[in-house]
Amino acid sequence: MPEPSSSARHAVLISGSPSATSRSRALLECAAAILERLGARVTLVDLATLPAAALLGRERDAAVDAALGAASSASLAVIATPVYRATYTGLLKVFFDLMRPDTLRGTVALAIATAASAEHALAIPLGIAPLVASVGAIVAPVGVFATDAEFQDRRPTAALEARLTQAVSDARVLAQALHHSPS
């Protein structure tokens, strides 16, 4: 079997949370550890640390350009966000607004969302999936939605971590299948 191309080994993890200690960020960090154990090169994009004026498209900034470049060069994008007002954060929206319609063409996108209650579970299929598809991403069939009850001391429970591990592994297999080098 041919080796995966270098892009197949690159994953970008995008944190749409305004807080570095959020539950969605904790899941993203777990996803990063899982991917690193699987041999992927991981780039973390923390949108809360990027300059607001550049995220709003009012000016150019090297850090925002680098974040967009990391997203466009990865075979797998893991996007994590808390759910506010029944959808993803404004940070995530303004970042994706900077992308061309084909920026993530061929990239597998895995959505991770957290919320206080299960009433927000549709945020992945009705919000995040269309957002990433609008820039050409291939939406992983199974995302990870978690409620506050699935965390203990701000860490995911064993059951949630097992769901995350399966979803990350499956998304990576899909990305590798799409990005094999020709033999």
Image (tube, grey):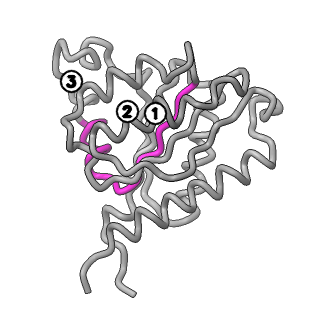
Q: Which residue is mark 1?
A: 128
- Magenta stretch in the rendered image: 66-82
Task: Name the residue: 41% across, 68% down.
Answer: 176
At label 3, counting other C-alpha atoms closer than 10 Å, the crowd grade (few under 14, some 14-19, many 20 or more) is some
Name the one closer to the observer, 43 or 167: 167
Q: Which structural element holds mark 2?
A: helix
- Disc nearer the start of the sequence (3/1): 3
Label number found at residue 38: none
Given the image, on which type of amino acid does mark 2 rest? Leu
The verdict on residue 77 being magenta is yes
Task: Name the residue: 57% across, 22% down.
Answer: 83
Q: CA distance from mark 1 to mark 2?
A: 5 Å
Given the image, on which type of amino acid does mark 3 rest? Asp
- Disc nearer the start of the sequence (2/3): 3
Residue 7 point in image, percent of width and height: 31, 61
Label number found at residue 61: 3
Residue 86 point in image, percent of width and height: 56, 18
In the image, is residue 106 above or below residue 62? below
Residue 25 point in image, percent of width and height: 58, 32
In the image, is residue 108 above or below residue 146? below
Q: Which structural element holds mark 1?
A: helix
Task: Name the residue: 46% across, 29% down.
Answer: 127
Given the image, on which type of amino acid does mark 1 rest? Ile
Q: Which residue is mark 2?
A: 131
Q: Disc 3 vs disc 1: which is toward the camera? A: 1
The verdict on residue 151 being magenta is no
Whether the residues at callouts 1 and 2 have beta carbons within 8 Å, the answer is yes
Name the one closer to the observer, 155 or 170: 170
At label 2, counting other C-alpha atoms closer than 10 Å, the crowd grade (few under 14, some 14-19, many 20 or more) is some
In the image, is residue 17 above or below residue 138? above
Please identify the quarter of the rendering in which residue 144 is found: top right
